[in-house]
Amino acid sequence: MAPARATGVGGAFAAYAEGVDAIASNAAAVAVRVPYSYDWIDFDLTLGISFPAPFSGTDFDNDGKVGFTYENFYFYSLGGKLQLGPWGIGVMSDFQTYGLLPAQREGDPQLRETLGKVHAVVGRSLLGGQLAVGGGLRLVTFAINAQNGVAPAELSMQNAAPEVGVQIRPDYVPWRLGATFRAPVEGRVETASAASASGSLPFIPPAGVALPWELEVGAAIQLGPRPLNPQWINPRDQESGLREQIAAERAARQVAQDLELQVICDPSERAERARQFARQETSIRREEDQRLDEHQQSLKAERRARYMNWPRERITVFIELLVSGKVANAIGLESYFSGQAALAGAAPTTDFRRSGERISYSPRLGFEGEPVVNWLQTRFGTYIEPSRFGGPPRQHFTFGFNMKLVPWSGPFRIFGDQIWQISGIADLAPRYQSFGVSLGAWH
């Protein structure tokens, strides 16, 4: 499960590491300035959802078996980042909920689990944006809630571990390199109801929930006239000449005024002259501020025109390898859900199976282009999904698109003149299919 753009290119996104979606692929992405970032302060948002119906009857976790129902499975993602000059801070989260024992009518017993992963990172770009580094925490949270006709119970666990990332993107070369490492996370039970303590839970309480350590390394190569790594122009640097000139002029005026006031002997006359200087200075500074604002708007228009005048034709190739570590004494979520279903009175569809007993490797390849210039972007990819249960791997084929919509400024014009896009994805493999949609900004 991944954001739309990353899924469309087979998950090979650690090297490209651009946009808020990339935070889940590379911790350094939060500090990477996109070519259409014109301001010293910038932000990015994302929201996505995957529908539950396609998962029904699939081998979701690649354990070699099908038949477990995912009709009450929901997956959604939400993220945002804020950039201040070379610094960036961001959060990318995804949550899945599963109605293990969904209510058929009001008052029916229910069991629901929620699993969440959150990346909270901070980063900085160096060497004029040619190097970006980032780090932060990867958090996991897991909860089970039971209600209506079964013993009221709650179980929750959460924990966090560090992650670090790096991206190398020399100015105006057609390639990028990226890597990120995530330490293992293991959440232990933190809170439980009295029913948990008494052993009367209507489900089997796990000892903990674990995410293995991960190493993600990749490269991105771009073909065509569009530049992959244009140098980001820092507005503060571009405006510094006029700012320094205005500051020098103000300092010179202050010195001249002080000298003139010093030679005036009469206190009342000196005070009157000082008031005249204050009125003049207010008027002059208003004109200087207006001149600086006009200069800033002119430079921003130049930066925007610079981006808009680049050719859009290109093909970007994404290559990546994801390595996932071992997890001791673990079973997969599907196996766990099956056991819960049996305990709740339903027939189990699988038995408990060990998961993560060996290191797994997932090679990935993706392609992205813009066949209808400034209207439609398409992507496709493939990746090998290793089985965490010791079985054979399977190959996935992914597809995605971005379609340009209309401008919408939002309430109080918070989004300015932003043009929006709708994105769709598909991920197909033996015994598996997934479809998703997301809304984002068109660039």
Image (cartoon, grey):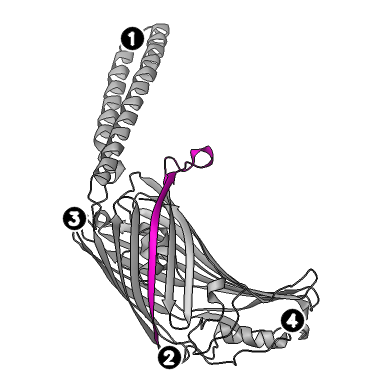
Whichever of callouts 4 and 2 sits on the residue coming sooner in the sequence is 4
Q: CA distance from mark 4 to mark 2?
A: 32 Å
Disc number at residue 225?
3
Q: Which residue is mark 4?
A: 196
The answer to whether 28 is drawn above or below residue 202 in the figure is above
Q: Amino acid at mark 1?
A: Ile
Whichever of callouts 2 and 3 sits on the residue coming sooner in the sequence is 3
Q: Are marks 2 and 3 in contact (CB under 8 Å)?
A: no
Q: CA distance from mark 1 to mark 3?
A: 68 Å
Whichever of callouts 1 and 4 sits on the residue coming sooner in the sequence is 4
Please tell me which residue is depicted at 32% across the width and 24% down the height of the picture: 288
Q: CA distance from mark 1 to mark 4?
A: 86 Å
Q: Are marks 4 and 2 in contact (CB under 8 Å)?
A: no
Q: Which residue is mark 2?
A: 358
* Mark 4 element type: helix
Q: Which residues are magenta?
A: 393-419
Judge whether residue 390 can be spotted in this image: yes
